Amino acid sequence: MIVEQMVEGGCFEAVEALAEHAYIGRGRFDWAKVREEAHKSLDDRYGEAQVELCIEKCKG
């Protein structure tokens, strides 16, 4: 049985906001910058695994 990991709404919204600031045009984002900023600012609140999950979900 596969258990799908739950995405914390607040974490996902924060990652989305970081992605908006890392938009580089033509539908592209600087995901390295998003990842760096997300881990720097959100790890203490949500944990590394949750932040990575939110980044992957945001990337679609």
Image (cartoon, rainbow, N blue to C red):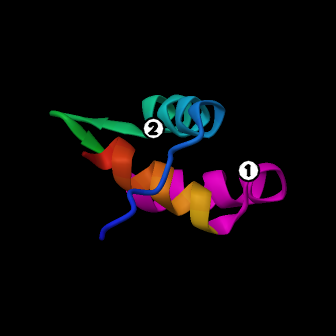
Magenta stretch: give its range.
30-48
State the residue at coordinates (54%, 40%). 15
**Which residue is drawn at the image coordinates 51% and 44% (left, top)?**
7
In-front residue for pair 24/6: 6
The residue most toward the right is: 44
At which x and y percent is residue 8?
Answer: 59, 40
What secondary structure is found at the residue carrying circle 2? helix
Residue 33 appearing in the image:
no
Image vertical order of residue 45 relative to residue 2, above or below: above
Q: Is residue 30 visible?
A: yes
Q: What is the chief secondary structure element of the magenta stretch?
A: helix
Quadrant the N terminus occupies = bottom left
Extreme front residue here? 1
What residue sits right under mark 1 in the picture?
Answer: 42
Q: Which residue is mark 2?
A: 19
User: Does residue 52 lie above or below 46 as drawn?
Assistant: below
Which amino acid type corresponds to the residue marked 1 in the rendered image? Leu
- Taking the image as shown, residue 44 lies to the left or right of residue 9, namely right
Q: Is residue 60 left or right of residue 33?
A: left
Nearer-N-terminus badge (2/1): 2
Where residue 26 sits, quadrant-wise, is top left
- Relative side of 6 to 45, left or right: left
**Residue 38 among those drawn in magenta:** yes
Q: Nearer the viewer, residue 9 or 16?
A: 9
- What residue is shown at x 65% (from left), y 31% (from top)? 10
Say if the magenta span includes residue 23.
no
